[in-house]
C-alpha cells in the first residue's frame, strides 16, 4: 500500500530539488547526517532523477550498509554505474534481475539498461596471474645502485597484475565516471595529450601520463584493484630466475621495449610513446607487457633507499611513511641500464610528469 510522504522525506526531496540543483561534483557533495537508510534511499532516487549520479552513489553506498539487498537501492546503483560507464554495471543489473519479481514495472527498463551496458565504450582491463611463492629481490654490483641491495628472498601471495599500462581511453572513462581532474603536466602544456576532457587524435591507446600517485591509486581502486607493491611489481617483471629484464638477460632492442638509445632524449609529442599493447617480444614471464620502458609506473610503497636492509621477508608493503613514492620500469626517455627490472626510482606523489603512468594490481581470490 502506498504510504504518505513523511516530513523528513519531504525535506530531503526539497533539498535535492533546491540546494543541489547546481549539480555539484561528488567531491563537493556532503552526505546529510542523521538520515535513516529508508530516507537516504528516497534522497538517492531524487538525485538519480536529476542526473546527479555521482552524488547519488554516495547516498546509495551509505544506505546499503543497512539495506544490502534492497531492490530500489540495487536498481539505482545499476542505473548510475551504467550512466557513468563504471565497471560492475552489468553485474549490478544481473543482481537486480535475480532479486526483483518477474512482473516488476521497471523490469523492461532494466533489460534495456543491460543492453546498454553490453555496449560500454571503455576498454576492460586484462589481468595476468602471478603465482604465490618466493623470488630473489634486488641486485648488487655491476650497474646496480646502492638502493637495489642487498639481494634478499621475498615470499608473496598470489596476485593479479594488469597486462598493460592504463591507456588514455581507459582513463577517460574513469574521468567521466568520477569527475576527477584530467591529466595535466605539472610544468608545460606541450606535454599534455588531452584538450579539456577530450583526447588528442590518435592517443587513446597510448599510456595515460601526467598522473599523480593519488590519481593512479584512485584509478586502480575504480577498476576494482590497487597499485602493486614494489615487491609485487618486481616479481611480475622478472619472475623467479633473477633475470635483468622482463624478457631475460639479453640487452633491450627496438623490438622489446620503448626506451632511449641516447643519454638525453627530448619529448617529440605522442610519437615518444608506444601503444600499451605493443612490444609483445618484451613481455614478462607472466605475460605482462612493457614493464621495461614506455612510462614509469607508480607503485604502492613509500620510497626508502635503505628499506631492503630491514624489509619483511613476506608480502612487504614498504615504509609506513615517507616523502616520495616509488616508481618502477623506466620510460621512453631512459637508457638500457635504467629500465632494468630491479632499478628503483622515486617522485613526489603530487608530481604529474610526461614519463609517469599507471599499472594496477589486485588480490587473487
Image (spheres, rainbow, N blue to C red):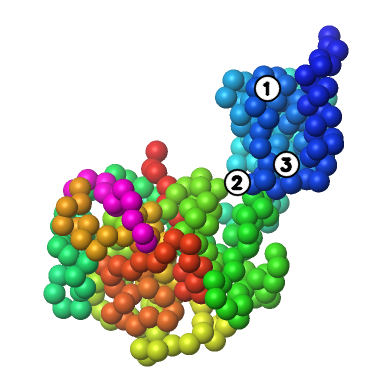
Mark 1, mark 2: which one is toward the viewer?
1
Q: Earlier in the sequence, mark 2 or mark 3?
A: 3
What residue would you read off at disc 1? 35
In the picture, the disc for residue 87 is 2
Depicted 107 relative to depicted 245: above or below: above
Residue 115, image x and y in percent? Answer: 74, 44
Our reading of the magenta stretch's main secondary structure is loop
Secondary structure beneath label 1: loop
Secondary structure beneath label 2: loop
Q: Is residue 348 left or right of residue 4?
A: left
What residue would you read off at disc 3? 53
Mark 3, mark 1: which one is toward the viewer?
1
Q: Is residue 263 left or right of residue 34?
A: left
Q: Earlier in the sequence, mark 3 or mark 1?
A: 1
Mark 2 nearby-residue class (10 Å; few <14, some 14–19, many ≥20): many
Query: Do the residues bearing badges 3 and 1 touch, measured as CB atoms within 8 Å?
Result: no
In the picture, the disc for residue 58 is none
On-image quarter of the C terminus: top left
Q: How many marks?
A: 3
Q: Earlier in the sequence, mark 1 or mark 2?
A: 1
Secondary structure beneath label 3: helix
Amino acid at each position: 500500500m502506498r504510504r504518505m510522504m513523511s516530513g523528513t522525506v519531504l525535506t530531503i526531496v526539497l533539498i535535492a530539488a533546491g540546494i543541489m540543483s547546481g549539480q555539484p561534483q561528488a567531491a563537493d557533495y556532503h552526505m546529510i547526517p542523521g538520515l535513516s537508510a529508508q530516507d537516504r534511499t528516497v534522497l538517492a532516487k531524487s538525485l538519480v532523477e536529476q542526473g546527479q549520479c555521482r552524488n547519488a552513489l554516495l547516498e546509495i553506498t551509505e544506505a546499503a550498509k543497512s539495506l544490502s539487498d534492497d531492490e530500489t537501492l540495487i536498481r539505482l546503483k545499476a542505473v548510475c554505474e551504467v550512466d557513468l560507464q563504471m565497471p560492475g554495471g552489468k553485474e549490478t543489473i544481473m543482481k537486480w534481475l535475480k532479486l526483483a519479481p518477474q512482473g516488476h514495472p521497471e523490469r523492461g527498463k532494466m533489460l534495456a539498461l543491460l543492453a546498454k551496458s553490453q555496449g560500454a565504450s571503455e576498454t576492460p582491463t586484462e589481468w595476468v596471474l602471478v603465482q604465490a611463492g618466493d623470488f630473489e629481490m634486488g641486485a648488487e654490483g655491476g650497474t646496480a645502485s646502492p638502493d637495489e641491495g642487498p639481494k634478499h628472498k621475498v615470499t608473496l601471495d598470489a596476485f593479479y597484475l594488469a597486462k598493460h599500462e592504463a591507456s588514455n581511453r581507459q582513463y577517460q572513462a574513469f574521468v567521466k565516471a568520477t569527475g576527477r581532474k584530467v591529466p595535466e603536466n605539472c610544468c608545460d602544456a606541450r606535454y599534455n595529450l588531452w584538450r579539456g576532457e577530450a583526447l588528442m587524435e590518435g592517443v587513446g591507446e597510448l599510456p595515460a601520463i601526467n598522473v599523480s600517485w593519488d590519481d593512479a591509486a584512485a584509478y586502480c581502486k575504480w577498476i576494482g584493484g590497487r597499485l602493486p607493491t614494489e615487491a609485487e611489481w618486481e616479481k611480475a617483471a622478472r619472475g623467479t630466475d633473477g633475470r635483468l629484464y622482463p624478457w631475460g638477460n639479453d640487452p633491450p632492442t627496438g623490438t622489446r621495449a620503448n626506451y632511449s638509445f641516447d643519454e638525453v632524449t627530448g619529448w617529440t609529442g605522442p610519437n615518444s610513446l608506444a601503444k600499451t599493447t605493443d612490444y609483445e617480444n618484451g613481455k614478462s614471464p607472466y605475460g605482462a607487457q612493457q614493464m621495461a620502458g614506455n612510462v614509469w609506473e607508480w607503485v604502492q610503497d613509500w620510497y626508502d633507499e635503505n628499506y631492503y636492509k630491514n624489509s619483511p621477508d613476506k608480502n612487504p608493503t614498504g615504509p609506513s611513511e615517507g616523502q616520495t613514492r616509488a616508481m618502477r620500469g623506466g620510460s621512453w626517455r631512459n637508457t638500457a641500464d635504467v629500465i632494468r627490472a630491479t632499478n628503483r626510482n622515486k617522485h613526489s606523489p603530487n608530481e604529474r610528469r610526461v614519463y609517469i603512468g599507471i599499472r594496477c594490481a589486485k588480490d587473487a581470490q
